[in-house]
Amino acid sequence: MARFDVTDAEWALIEPHVPVAATGPLPRRVRDQFNGILWRFRTGSGWRDVPQRYGPWSTVYSRFNSWAKAGMFQALMDALIAEA
């Protein structure tokens, strides 16, 4: 885990709000991809600069794009604010 990646406690709050496919559980690397999205916005870098430890940049971008279109980030924010 990199320095600014979400901790296990933070992930426990986030994971229930991450959309899952109707066919099964979360993909194995979804936490890495979430961390890659956070890394990209925290640094202001381009998608192609996302470190390989988060997976291929195109996969991280695709995950971000589908989650953003589904409204997942707003729903996550609302849930975390309500939790606080």
Image (tube, rainbow, N blue to C red):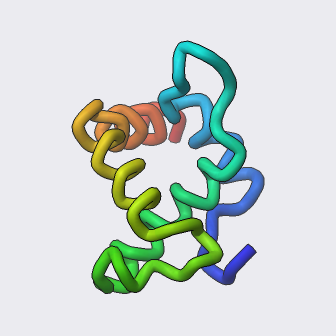
The residue under the point 55% across, 64% down is 35
The residue under the point 62% across, 60% down is 32
**Vertical side of 36 occupied by 22: above or below:** above
Residue that protrudes farthest toward the left in the picture: 69
- Measured as percent of width and height from the top left, residue 16 is found at 60, 29
The residue under the point 28% across, 31% down is 70
- Measured as percent of width and height from the top left, residue 84 is found at 51, 41
Task: Between residue 10 and residue 25, name the one nearer to us.
Answer: 25
Task: Between residue 14 and residue 22, name the one nearer to us.
Answer: 22
The residue under the point 32% across, 85% down is 45
- Measured as percent of width and height from the top left, residue 65 is found at 29, 48
Q: Is residue 26 left or right of residue 21?
A: right
Task: Between residue 73 and residue 54, name the one nearer to us.
Answer: 54
Q: Is residue 47 left or right of residue 36?
A: left
Q: Is residue 54 left or right of residue 70?
A: right
**Vertical side of 54 occupied by 46: above or below:** below
Q: Quadrant of residue 14?
A: top right
Q: Quadrant of residue 20?
A: top right
Marker count (numbered): 0
Residue that protrudes farthest toward the top in the picture: 22
Which quarter of the rendered picture does the N terminus lie within?
bottom right
**Vertical side of 9 occupied by 50: above or below:** below
Q: Is residue 2 left or right of residue 60?
A: right
